[in-house]
Image (cartoon, rainbow, N blue to C red):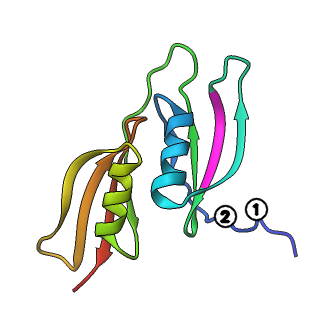
């Protein structure tokens, strides 16, 4: 049976245009156990297109085309243990945006900015 999308891909995938796609990919592999799926580097070494899988989702990543700026992004991701994920993200070179805390909803959530400039909001449903 043919499909309108590749096996293992969700219908929607975030596409991050960052300053330092290679560093972002390395960060995601170290911090969130991402699996690098594909990567196409330009002659100048910049990432023209890369893909990583985090749990059940493919995230696409690239350096900006010449003459264009990176696009600041926020990404929310559910993880089994928000405290552990937050700690690993800091150890992998991320910068804290907010320590994990539970507020008025069932999620305990924290934020970390990666080396490419994307802020990852990690959460675990606890209540």
Label placed on residue 127: none
Residue with the mark numbered 2 = 9
- The boundaries of the magenta stretch are 47-52
From the top left corner, tell me how far across and down residue 51 is, in percent.
64, 48
Which residue is drawn at the image coordinates 46% and 28% (left, top)? 19
Residue with the mark numbered 1 = 6
Specify few, some or many for label 1: CA neighbours under 10 Å numbering under 14, 14-19, or 20 or more: few
Residue 30 sits above or below residue 109 on the image: above
> Is residue 111 at all visible to an observer of this figure?
yes
**Do callouts 2 and 1 mark residues in contact (Cβ within 8 Å)?**
yes
> Is residue 75 at all visible to an observer of this figure?
no
Q: Quadrant of residue 3?
A: bottom right
Q: In front here: 72 or 36?
A: 36
Q: CA distance from mark 2 to mark 1?
A: 6 Å
Q: Is 64 in the magenta?
A: no
Residue 24 sits above or below residue 37 on the image: above
> On the rendered structure, is 9 left or right of 117?
right
From the top left corner, tell me how far across and down residue 119 is, in percent.
33, 46
Which residue is drawn at the image coordinates 50% and 51% (left, top)? 28
> On the rendered structure, is 96 left or right of 22?
left
The residue furthest front is: 91
Which quarter shows the N terminus?
A: bottom right
Q: Is 50 in the magenta?
A: yes
Residue 113 sits above or below residue 116 on the image: below
Q: Quadrant of residue 100?
A: bottom left
Specify few, some or many for label 2: CA neighbours under 10 Å numbering under 14, 14-19, or 20 or more: few
From the top left corner, tell me how far across and down residue 125 is, in percent.
29, 79
Q: In front here: 87 or 53?
A: 87
The residue furthest top is: 67
């Amino acid at each position: 049976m043919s499909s309108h999308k590749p096996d293992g891909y969700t219908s929607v995938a975030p596409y991050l245009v960052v300053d330092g796609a290679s560093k972002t990919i390395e960060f995601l592999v170290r911090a969130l156990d991402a699996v690098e799926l594909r990567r196409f580097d330009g002659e100048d070494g910049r990432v023209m297109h890369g893909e990583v899988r985090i749990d059940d989702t493919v995230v696409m990543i690239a350096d900006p085309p010449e003459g264009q700026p990176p696009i600041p992004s926020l990404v929310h991701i559910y993880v089994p243990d928000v405290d552990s994920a937050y700690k690993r993200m800091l150890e992998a070179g991320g910068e804290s945006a907010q320590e994990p805390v539970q507020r008025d909803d069932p999620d305990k959530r924290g934020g970390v900015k990666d080396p490419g400039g994307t802020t990852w909001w990690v959460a675990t449903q606890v209540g």
